[in-house]
Image (cartoon, rainbow, N blue to C red):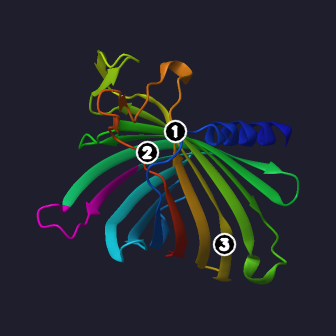
Amino acid sequence: MNKIILVACLIGTITVNAQITETDNTMLWTTLGVNKKLDDKFSLSYYQLHSFSLNDSRINFIQPDLEIEYELSKSWDASVGYSPTFSLDGVQGNQLLYHRVSADIKVSTKLGKRIRMKNSITGEYHFTQRSKFKQRYYYRLDLYYRDTKLPWRLRPFINQKLYWYSNGKPLQYYDDNGDQTELKSPNGLHAYRIQTGIKLYPMDDFSFAIYFQKQKEFNSTLFGGRDINSLNPNSNSIRRPFYDFSVIGISCSYKL
């Protein structure tokens, strides 16, 4: 338990030290999903996320997610997935389609009688190069409380993600005098997400969750990381500002 608290505090410290944000959007995410166990080892899942902007009352994107999971042991699982993102915009010609594949491995651990923990590492490859990354990797820590005596098997939960961005579009950097120094991809630890909520099981095969999520982007020099929001001292302008957002989420899942 002490190791978990240490990791959570470390991640939180990185976030507290993040620079002032340039954006802070609020969204509503609704997700519908189905799961099917194929045999003793393999399972298949399909989820579809719909994102609505609460700032300007429009649909941001729709994101299906198809994943196949393999049970390595009672504690270890591995999975691969494919996820296209349909980015919607009111401006004609700005409707974009992004493709992404991913792979992860996770381990589940019991912490006493009621608390469960999952640790996972995920790698993503984006076929369309985004401004800040083409590959993205993250560590995820999940904690939830399990007590079958609670109404609808209510489960409070919290999860945290720490993201590493890689191979984004080259960014021009400057020294304090305004002279150009290097043109490189802004690789590094650059985003943190925290999500907390409750999950309910009104029926054995149906679950329902409500949650709140927050993302904070930041600059970090750990492991040779570079800034993602380069300041040009000559014009006092910032390229690629931080993208921070808040989410109110609702998720439903059904086991076939």
Three-letter residue code for mark 1? Phe
In the rendered image of this protein, does residue 209 appear above or below residue 4? Answer: below
Q: Are marks 2 and 1 in contact (CB under 8 Å)?
A: yes
* Crowd tier of the residue under label 1, counting other residues whose Cα lies within 10 Å: few below 14, some 14–19, many 20 or above: many
The residue shown at (29%, 33%) is 235
Which secondary structure, mark 3?
strand
- The residue labelled by disc 2 is 242
Residue 65 included in the magenta stretch of the image: no
Residue 89 included in the magenta stretch of the image: yes
Three-letter residue code for mark 2? Phe
* Crowd tier of the residue under label 2, counting other residues whose Cα lies within 10 Å: few below 14, some 14–19, many 20 or above: many
Q: Earlier in the sequence, mark 3 or mark 2?
A: 3
The residue shown at (75%, 40%) is 9
Q: Earlier in the sequence, mark 1 or mark 3?
A: 3
In the rendered image of this protein, does residue 212 appear above or below residue 179? Answer: below
On the rendered structure, is 68 left or right of 2? left
Counting labels gives: 3
Residue 49 is drawn in which quadrant? bottom left
Where's the N terminus, which quadrant? top right
Three-letter residue code for mark 3? Lys
The location of residue 182, given as percent across then percent down, is: 31, 16
The residue shown at (25%, 66%) is 88
Disc nearest the viewer among 1 and 3 = 1
Which secondary structure, mark 2?
loop
254 or 20, which is in the foreground?
20
In the rendered image of this protein, does residue 220 appear above or below residue 256? Answer: above
In the rendered image of this protein, does residue 89 appear above or below residue 126? Answer: below
Q: Which residues are magenta?
A: 81-95
57 or 21, which is in the foreground?
21
Disc nearest the viewer among 3 and 2 = 2
Determine which of the numbered discs, if any, sits on residue 218 in the image.
1
